[in-house]
Image (tube, rainbow, N blue to C red):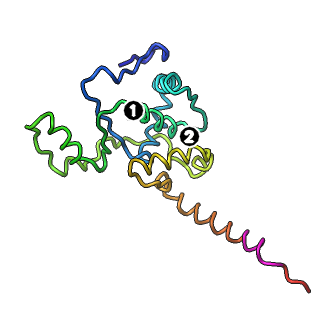
Amino acid sequence: MWAKNADPDECDIRFGSFEKIVVHLRNPFASFPSLIDENRTGWSKRIRFSYIKRSLGIDIRGNELEQAILGYLYYNRLALEKADFFFRIEHDYEKLRSYLSEYHSDLPELPEEETSKRVNSKPHSKAVRAKDWDAVSVSTKELLWQFCETYGYDYSPEILRPKFRWKLSALLIKLRFWVTLILVPKRRP
């Protein structure tokens, strides 16, 4: 735990003080709006980013979306390195239940409707725009794609904003037009 006014260099996130460490993963694309809001809370961002810098030597930069992506990826990397078990909250209820039943044989049943209930439904202060995604570096997008492949998530930036798909289609139409201009020879009179 840490306090809001704590010095990030003095905060120590200890993964080793528990008998077993269980890490939950959340769909990264569903996480980014929340992480952008969380990063606007200066003390929280300073503590997490300072921990990442001390542990991995990485200084996170970029626009708000890129910082959310990199913070998500590197923090989860650190957590997963220490984890005895991980699960994806959207998909792995039975996997989690099986793991926990190794230690507690009398787990109560959790009705299916309880596992699919939306819990954190607070509105976010800003929607992620297509131009925010476009400003994210290719190397960061590659890291995100690798994470999605490794942990079984769809690499789906279009869920960040509904109009993203339309903007991508518009871009493909422009590219097709430009390719046509380049490849089709001009007619000579």
Picture residue at 50% right of the left edge, 53% below the top: 157
Question: Mark number for residue 66?
Answer: 2
Side of 109 where 130 appears, left or right? right
Secondary structure that dominates the magenta span:
helix
Picture residue at 9% right of the left edge, 37% below the top: 105
Helix, strand or loop status at disc 1: helix
Q: Check if residue 171 falls in the magenta segment.
A: no
Query: In the rendered structure, which segment of residues is drawn in magenta?
Result: 178-185
Q: Residues within 10 Å of mark 1 (few under 14, many from 20)?
A: few
Q: Position of residue 146 (x, y in %)?
A: 49, 48
Side of 117 where 178 appears, left or right? right
Helix, strand or loop status at disc 2: helix
Q: Residues within 10 Å of mark 2 (few under 14, many from 20)?
A: many
Q: Position of residue 59 (x, y in %)?
A: 58, 28
Q: Which residue is mark 1?
A: 81
Residue type at tag 1: Glu
Side of 177 where 106 appears, left or right? left
**First in sequence: mark 1 or mark 2?**
2
Q: Position of residue 6 (x, y in %)?
A: 45, 14
Q: Nearer the viewer, residue 78 or 128?
A: 78
Reply above or below: 75 against 112: above
* Label 1 vs label 2, nearer the camera: 1
Picture residue at 52% right of the left edge, 37% below the top: 70
Q: Position of residue 64 (x, y in %)?
A: 56, 38
Question: Where, quadrant-wise, is the C terminus in this rendering?
Answer: bottom right
Question: Where, quadrant-wise, is the N terminus in this rendering?
Answer: top left
In the image, farthest residue toward the left: 106
Question: Mark number for residue 56?
Answer: none
Report, in whole angstroms, how far the alpha carbon at label 1 lies from the one at label 2: 22 Å
Q: Nearer the viewer, residue 16 or 26?
A: 16
Residue type at tag 2: Glu
In the image, farthest residue toward the right: 189
